[in-house]
Image (cartoon, rainbow, N blue to C red):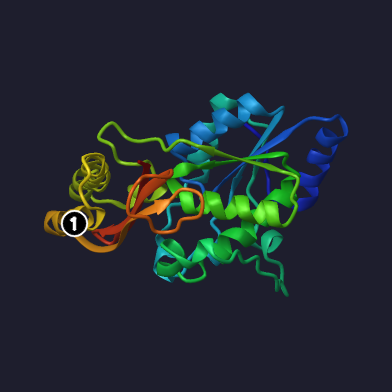
Amino acid sequence: MTAPILRKLDDLREMTNGWRMSGESIGVVPTMGALHDGHLSLVAAAKKTCNRVIVTIFVNPKQFNNPEDLKNYPRTEEEDARKLERFTVDALWVPDGDQMYPDGFATTVSVAGLTDVMDGAYRPGHFDGVATVVTKLFTQTSASDAFFGEKDFQQLLVVRRMAADLDLPITVHGCPTIRDIDGLALSSRNLLLSDRARTLAPRLFEELEGIAEGLSKGEAVTTLQEKAKDRLLKTGFTEIDYIDLRAQSDLSLVEDTSKPARLFAAAYLAGVRLIDNIAV
Ligand code: PAF
C-alpha cells in the first residue's frame, strides 16, 4: 500500500497527534533516501516494534562537508516510495527544505567527544549536521522509537548520546549492517561506484575480516592495519582515512580486544568514500 507523502510539518503533526492520543507507539526510520535493503531492514524492525512507522527522506545539506558530495548524492524518491509499499508504512516524511531550515534558522546540536575522531575528524561539521537534523526529526515525528544501522556506528553512538543528553523520550535501536552477497556493506553511495569499482569495493570488508582474524591469533594491531592499508592502496583505493580498532562504548583507541571493540574503516575508491565496521 502506498504511504501518504507528507511535506508540511502541520500535516505531519495532525497525523501524529491522533496516534499519540490513542496511545500508539511511533517508530521513525530516518534516511536520506536512495533506499536499499539496509534501510528496508530498519523499516522491518520498526514495523515489528511499533504501532505506527514513519520513514523520513531528507538529504540534509548541513551534514555534507563537501558541496560536490551533496550535489551527487542519489535522489530517487519515486522508487523509494515503491520499495516501501510492501511494508505498509504509515507515512513518508519528506519535508520541503524550508520546513526543516526556515529563514533565520540558527540552532546547532553538537555532541562533544565522540565526534572528535574518525568521521568527525575527517568530515568537519558532519556530525553537527546529523545531530541537528536528527533532533528535529525526532521532535517533528514525536517518535517513541528510532532505528539506525550499525554500518554508521559512530552516528548511532552520537545519536544515542544526543537523545540521552537532551532527555528526548525516545529509544534508539541499533540494527545490524546488511551486506551484499560479496560482503560489501549496503550504502546509498554504492550507487555511485563504477562497475569496476564495485568489484573492488568488498576488499574493504575483507581487510577488516583479515585484521580480526590476525587479532584472534595474537598479532599486533598496528602491523595488521599497515599491511591492510598497503594492500587496499595497491588494489586501487586512492586514500585511506582510517582503519582503527576502537572501544565499542566510547570509540577510544584500543590495542586488543579485552573489552568489546570494533574495527572501523573509511577509504576512497574511484572518488567514492566508503565506510565499514565490524565487531571483534
Ligand atoms: O544515516 C543517514 O542517512 C543520515 O545521516 C540521517 C541519519 C538520515 C540524518 O540525515
Q: Amino acid at mark 1?
A: Thr
| Disc 1 residue: CB within 8 Å of ligand 1 | no
Residue 247 horizontal/vertical position (percent): 43, 51
Which quadrant does the N terminus fall into? top right
Residues 217 and 201: in front is 217
Which one is in front, 44 or 103? 44
Quadrant for the C terminus in the image: top left
Q: How many marks?
A: 1
Q: Up-down: is 24 above or below 6?
A: above
Which secondary structure, mark 1? helix
Packing grade of label 1 (10 A; few <14, some 14-19, many >=20) is few
| Residue 125 falls left or right of residue 215 | right
Does 190 sit left or right of 115 as displayed? left
Left/right placement of residue 107 relative to residue 121 reads: right
Residue 226, image x, y percentages: 19, 59
Label 1: which residue?
223
Q: Residue most toward the left?
A: 234
Rendered image quadrant of residue 230: bottom left
For image coordinates 43% across by 69% down, the residue present is 121
The answer to whether one can see residue 48 in this image is: yes
149 or 88, nearer to the observer: 149
Kindly identify the residue that appears in the image at 80 percent across and 50 percent down: 10
Q: Residue visible at 45% across and 35% down?
A: 176
Which residue sits at x=24%, y=46%?
Answer: 211
Residue 136 visible to an observer of this rendering: no
Q: Quadrant of residue 128?
A: bottom right
Farthest residue toward the right?
21
Q: Provide residue 195's location: percent of width, then percent of height.
A: 21, 46
**Image coords of residue 270 (percent x, y):** 23, 59
